């Protein structure tokens, strides 16, 4: 009986594991292999060059700039996005005025607010980037137009054309486009927390600030930790690439002030025809992503709370 059970499990998992190995694991292995060659991406002929690509990468100033920007994305975007999402979700679910017969209550019309927050998720990231590209236009953009309308003509930055502001402008777009997803996610988690916990805490004299850090956050910690890893991987991967590629000058400018690792990989491979060096940078990005996930999971480990 046991033998038949294990044979069924192996047969059930064989096809998915084979597909995963072919389409996920094997490309990683190929990338590592090509990083030790001089392959251009077009010619079938190439030769092994050892660690030359890695030595070149360590001496590449643009790589270090890109790595720095990607790390800023991975550290700041989850912090700001998840912080705002937790605040909004808590206000929507617990922050309303007390009503008759209820110690705590959500904001009136919270369902509408959740839809409004989630709306950017319906839009493609490419559309979002284009909309904000027009909004940041220093001459005819909506943001400088609003500043001019309220009499702040002297405060009209160049936004995406300013090397000191461009990266922060891109981060703001990513926060705006992703915070709604986590508002809905955290709202669902908060709705499952028994109201008795909050009512007991309020009867003991706790305020909403205390209930958030003593009840809500500990019981949602697993969700927050998963969201942090997910948001960090998004920030290191396709999301940051799409926004930087569409919105910024160059793209990646001005003066490489918004270049991230994913964009640098793309430009090196398809613009410069240096596929082997691009895969080397891709291997570095893989290591950074795995290290980020491992550190977050390790630092965020805590005793699991049940309710």
Image (cartoon, helix red, strand yellow):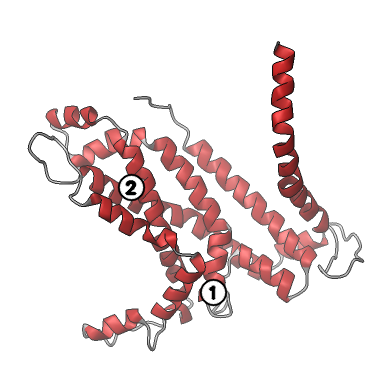
Disc assigned to residue 86? 2
Mark 2–mark 1 Cα distance, whole angstroms, equals 29 Å
- Give the vertical position of 74 relative to 170 (above or below): above
* Nearer to the camera, 90 or 130: 130
Image-quadrant location for residue 207: top left
Residue 248: image x %, image y %? Answer: 52, 76
- How many marks the image carries: the answer is 2
The reply to whether callout 2 and callout 1 are in contact (CB within 8 Å) is: no
Label 2 sits on a secondary structure element that is helix
Residue drawn 64% across the image and 70% down it: 62
Q: Is 176 left, or right, of 196 in this rendering?
A: right
What crowding class fits label 2: few (fewer than 14 Cα within 10 Å), some (14-19), or many (20 or more)? many
Viewer-nearest residue: 61 or 121? 121
Q: Quadrant of residue 48?
A: bottom right
From the viewer's side, name the closer residue of 203 and 122: 122
Give the residue at mark 1: 246
Left or right, residue 102 beside residue 304: left
Q: The N terminus lies in which quarter of the figure?
A: top right
At x 73%, y 43%, the residue is 19
Could one spot residue 164 in this view of the protein? no
- Residue in view at x 39 percent, y 78 percent: 135
Instruction: Classify the position of the C terminus by image quarter.
Output: top left
Mark 1 secondary-structure assignment: helix
Residue 252 vertical position relative to residue 51 in the rendered view, above or below: below
Horizontal placement of 271 versus 234: left or right?
right
**Can residue 63 be seen at all in this image of the molecule?**
yes
- Percent of width and height locating residue 216: 30, 36
Q: Relative to 236, does residue 9 appear above or below in the rendering?
A: above
Residue 75, horizontal then vertical, whole percent: 48, 54
């Amino acid at each position: 009986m046991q033998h038949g059970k294990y044979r069924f499990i192996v047969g059930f998992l064989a096809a998915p594991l084979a597909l995963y190995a072919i389409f996920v694991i094997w490309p990683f292995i190929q990338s590592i292999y090509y990083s030790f060659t001089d392959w251009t991406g077009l010619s079938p002929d190439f030769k092994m060059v050892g660690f030359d690509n890695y030595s070149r990468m360590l001496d590449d100033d643009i790589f270090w700039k890109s790595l720095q920007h990607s790390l800023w994305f991975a550290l700041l975007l989850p912090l700001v996005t998840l912080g705002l999402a937790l605040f909004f979700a808590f206000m929507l679910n617990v922050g309303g005025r007390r009503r008759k017969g209820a110690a705590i209550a959500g904001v009136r019309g919270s369902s509408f607010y959740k839809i409004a927050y989630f709306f950017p998720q319906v839009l493609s990231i490419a559309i979002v980037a284009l909309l904000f590209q027009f909004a940041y236009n220093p001459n005819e953009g909506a943001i400088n137009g609003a500043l001019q309308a309220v009499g702040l003509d002297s405060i009209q930055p160049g936004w995406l054309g300013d090397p000191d502001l461009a990266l922060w402008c891109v981060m703001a777009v990513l926060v705006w486009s992703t915070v709604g997803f986590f508002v809905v996610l955290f709202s669902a988690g908060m709705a499952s927390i028994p109201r008795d916990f909050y009512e007991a805490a309020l009867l003991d004299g706790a305020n909403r600030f205390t209930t958030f850090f003593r009840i809500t956050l500990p019981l949602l910690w697993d969700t927050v930790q998963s969201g942090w890893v997910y948001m960090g991987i998004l920030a290191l991967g396709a999301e940051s690439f799409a926004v930087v590629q569409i919105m910024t000058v160059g793209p990646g400018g001005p003066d490489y002030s918004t270049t991230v690792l994913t964009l640098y990989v793309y430009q090196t491979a398809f613009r410069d025809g240096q596929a082997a060096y691009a895969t080397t940078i891709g291997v570095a990005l893989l290591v950074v992503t795995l290290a980020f996930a491992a550190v977050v999971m390790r630092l965020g480990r805590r005793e699991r709370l049940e309710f």
